[in-house]
Structures are given as structure tokens and as C-alpha cells.
């Protein structure tokens, strides 16, 4: 099929995507293979942590759909994603007067977690689902007038839990979601 009419921007926030990552590297590779998808390894772009806000905003403007892809770190995101939100989603640009640049775009989280899906349940160890864990990102999305899309999650991303087969299956499912 000719595929996706949407321009999709996948922003990957992993501190060492090309060296230590297994799960996010595989997902990023799958994303790169989908038509209309641009992947940015944000940690690699800004090794000193200094974000080029104008460049990030320009990329966002081109996208119909934005994916925040990251490993769950302490029931949240790696710190550069938080910094990226604080700086890129600026007053007068993403919210406030004239701040409607993200209005109507879709935003989705694509996350990997070390723990199991059973642990991310109300009756599980963390007493919260992944959707609930990602609540700040959902509220942020809605605050800037964008549309929250159900997260894509891969659980048990540990050396023991993540078999080649599970990883390949996750990458295929991710590509399917990105194809739309
Ligand atoms: C600093 C740090 C914090 C982590 N916190 C969590 C966590 O809160 N919940 C969880 O399920 N996994 C947690 N993990 C496990 C990572 O989510 C897991 O290693 C990652 O998703 C695997 O993806 P990768 O192969 O791309 O690195 C943490 C890992 C690190 C290094």
C-alpha cells in the first residue's frame, strides 16, 4: 500500500541508543523503515544537553503525528525528554497567546519498560497501568491542544525477558502502528 499520508516524527530519547540500547534501537530501526517517518535520536543530537529549540520546533511543525519514544526510567522518562518539554513546548508557541502550533496534531508515547505488564496493573506491584504512569504526558498533550493516542508499550525489556522473537514481534507491531 502507498501507506501513510501522515508525516510522523519519532523523537527517540535514549541516552545510548546506538550502543547500549536493545529494545529502543530495534524499535527505532523499525520506525526508520516506514514511509513518511522521520526518526531523531535526540540524545545524540545534543550530547551536551543543549537543545536547539528552534530546530526542534521546526521539525514539529512539519509533523502531523509526533511520537515520544523512550525507555521508562523511574516511572517517567529519561531526563532529556523532560528538558525538551520544558524548553520546546514554549509559552507563545505551544500554549498561551499564539501558542497553537501543536493544535490538532497527534502525540503518542512509545515506551519500553523493564517490568512486566502484570506489574503495571491496579492489582499489580505498581498499582498503576502504563497509561496512568504516562498521565503527565497525556495532560501535556491535551494542554497544547494535541490529540493523545493510546501508548505503544513493550514490557519485560530485560536481558532475560526480551527474546529475539519478542523483540522482532514488538518491532513489527510498532511498524504497523506507525503505518497507521
Ligand atoms: C535509570 C533507569 C531507571 C529505570 N526505571 C524503570 C522503571 O521505572 N520502570 C521499568 O519498568 N523499567 C525501568 N528501567 C528499565 C528500562 O526501562 C529498560 O532497561 C529499558 O526499557 C530497556 O530498553 P533499551 O534496551 O532500549 O535500553 C529503568 C532503567 C534504568 C537504566
Image: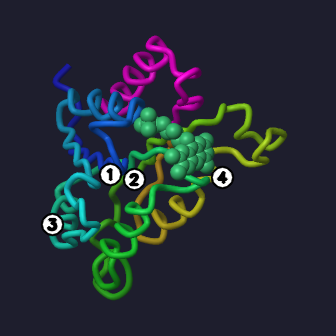
In percent of width and height, residue 101 lies at 27, 70
Sequence-first tag of 1 and 3: 3
Q: Nearer the viewer, residue 126 or 3?
A: 126
Q: Which mark is residue 66?
A: 1
- Select label 2 or label 4 by which is in front: 4
Q: Which mark is residue 107?
A: 2
- Select label 1 or label 3 by which is in front: 3
Are the residues at dot 2 and dot 4 in contact (C-beta closer than 8 Å)? no
137 up-or-down from 2: above or below: below
Q: How many marks?
A: 4
Q: Residues within 10 Å of mark 4 (few under 14, many from 20)?
A: some
Q: Is residue 172 part of the magenta span, yes or no?
A: yes
Q: Of all residues shown, which one is farthest toward the bottom?
A: 97
Q: Is label 1's Cβ within 8 Å of ligand 1?
A: no
- Stretch in magenta: 152-180
Are the residues at dot 1 and dot 2 in contact (C-beta closer than 8 Å)? yes
Which residue position holds label 4? 132
Amino acid at each position: 500500500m502507498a501507506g501513510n499520508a501522515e508525516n510522523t516524527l519519532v523523537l527517540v530519547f535514549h541516552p545510548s541508543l546506538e550502543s547500549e540500547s536493545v529494545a529502543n534501537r530495534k524499535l527505532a530501526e523499525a520506525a526508520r523503515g516506514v514511509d513518511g517517518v522521520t526518526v531523531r535520536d535526540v540524545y545524540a543530537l545534543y550530547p551536551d544537553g543543549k537543545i536547539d529549540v528552534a530546530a526542534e520546533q521546526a521539525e514539529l511543525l512539519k509533523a502531523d503525528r509526533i511520537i515520544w519514544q523512550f525507555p521508562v526510567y523511574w516511572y517517567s522518562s529519561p531526563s532529556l525528554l523532560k528538558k525538551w518539554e520544558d524548553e520546546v513546548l514554549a509559552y507563545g508557541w505551544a500554549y498561551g497567546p499564539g501558542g497553537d502550533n501543536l493544535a490538532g496534531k497527534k502525540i503518542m508515547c512509545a515506551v519500553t519498560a523493564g517490568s512486566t505488564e502484570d506489574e503495571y496493573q491496579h492489582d499489580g506491584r505498581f498499582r498503576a497501568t502504563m497509561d496512568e504512569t504516562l498521565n503527565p504526558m497525556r495532560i501535556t498533550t491535551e494542554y497544547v491542544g494535541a490529540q493523545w493516542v493510546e501508548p505503544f508499550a513493550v514490557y519485560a525489556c530485560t536481558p532475560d525477558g526480551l527474546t529475539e522473537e519478542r523483540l522482532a514481534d514488538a518491532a513489527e507491531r510498532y511498524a504497523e502502528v506507525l503505518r497507521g
